[in-house]
């Protein structure tokens, strides 16, 4: 597809630095995620870290209505775009923290799952399966591969584990802008015909639900929840297509 941007070596270098900062934010915040903390406190800690390291949040003010906080924190049945608030985490909560930073004009985007205390066996299985789905999607990435293979790999593993795949939201090109072509679907669709090429950069960020895949957006214009209020989980990495395969640009240092 001609409108998928191929990044230059200079652009890739800048994007890699932004991705390193985005991943470092998620490394740092893990120690603060515990029962009794508010998601607003977590948001403020992460924003200060981003600022201290020369970046700014890409989320703040984005869209219409403008997103009101610096990160997205989605708890339990919130699928994505959760707005940090004064609500305290309770024992057994699961949460996705999604961080996108701008550093020297380049974008780094990633998310991870966290837990507050001990969580249910089902919640743990959902979290682990969603991570496995992301990694299986990433494994398909190489020059000449179809973007459709990402969705096929994710959908197959999710369904084998009796979870549904959210279809309303997807991965995307990123790096020079927050959202670029292509859309990266996490389920199989014959409409996906784009082919990967060296220098493309995009996210793979599957969302899996315990119940049905259907979602709804709340009246704040951002918060997306499962219609049946079942648990949801998401993981996200930013990926570069290399000459021989791929590179994950948002790997944690605490691997």
Image (cartoon, rainbow, N blue to C red):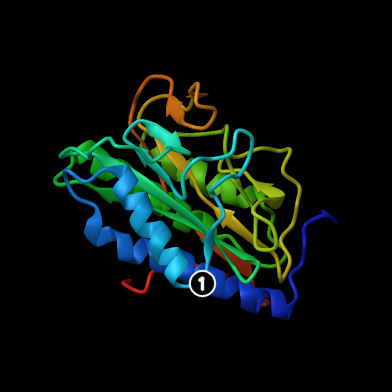
Q: Position of residue 112 (x, y in %)?
A: 38, 54
Disc 1 residue crowd, few under 14, some 14–19, many 20+, Cα 10 Å: few
**Towards the viewer: 63 or 155:** 63
Residue 153 in the figure: left or right of residue 82: right
Residue 4 appears in view = yes
| Residue 168 position in % (x across, y down) | 57, 32
Of the pair 145 and 30, the residue shown nearer to us = 30
Q: Residue at x 66, y 37 (%)?
A: 189
Of 136 and 124, nearer the camera is 124
Q: Residue at x 71, y 71 (%)?
A: 198
Q: Is residue 127 above or below residue 142?
A: above
- Viewer-proximal residue, 84 or 254? 84
- Classify residue 203 by image quadrant: bottom right
Q: Hey, which residue is sitting farthest right in the picture?
A: 2
Judge whether 75 appears above or below 212 on screen: below
Instruction: Give the residue displayed 66% in from the left and 75% down from the top.
Output: 12
Corner quadrant of residue 77: top left
Label 1 residue SS: loop
Relative to 187, 145 lies left or right: right
Q: Which residue is mark 1?
A: 54
Quadrant where the C terminus sits is bottom left
Give the x, y percent position of residue 53.
Answer: 46, 72
Q: Position of residue 193 (x, y in %)?
A: 76, 47
Question: How many discs appear?
Answer: 1
Q: Is residue 88 above or below residue 41?
A: above
Q: Is residue 236 visible?
A: no
Which residue: 46% across, 55% down?
A: 99
């Amino acid at each position: 597809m001609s409108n998928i941007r191929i990044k230059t070596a200079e652009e890739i270098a800048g994007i890699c630095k932004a991705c390193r900062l985005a991943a470092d934010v998620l490394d740092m915040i893990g120690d603060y995620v515990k029962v009794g903390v508010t998601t607003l406190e977590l948001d403020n800690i992460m924003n200060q870290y981003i600022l201290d390291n020369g970046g700014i949040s890409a989320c703040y003010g984005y869209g219409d209505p403008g997103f009101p906080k610096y990160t997205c924190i989605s708890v339990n049945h919130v699928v994505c775009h959760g707005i940090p608030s004064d609500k305290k985490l309770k024992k057994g909560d699961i949460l996705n923290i999604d961080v996108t930073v701008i550093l020297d004009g380049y974008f780094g985007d990633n998310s991870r799952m966290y837990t507050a205390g001990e969580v249910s066996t089902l919640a743990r299985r959902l979290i682990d399966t969603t991570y496995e789905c992301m990694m299986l999607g990433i494994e398909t990435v190489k020059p000449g591969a179809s973007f459709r293979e990402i969705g096929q790999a994710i959908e197959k593993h999710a369904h084998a584990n009796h979870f549904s795949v959210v279809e309303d939201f997807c991965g995307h090109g990123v790096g020079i802008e927050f959202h670029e072509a292509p859309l990266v679907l996490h389920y199989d669709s014959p409409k996906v015909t784009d082919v990967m090429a060296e220098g493309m950069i995009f996210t793979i960020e599957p969302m899996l639900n315990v119940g049905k895949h259907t979602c709804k957006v709340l009246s704040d214009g951002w918060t997306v929840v499962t219609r049946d209020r079942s648990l949801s989980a998401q993981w996200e990495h930013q990926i570069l297509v290399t000459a021989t395969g791929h590179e994950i640009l948002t790997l944690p240092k605490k691997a």
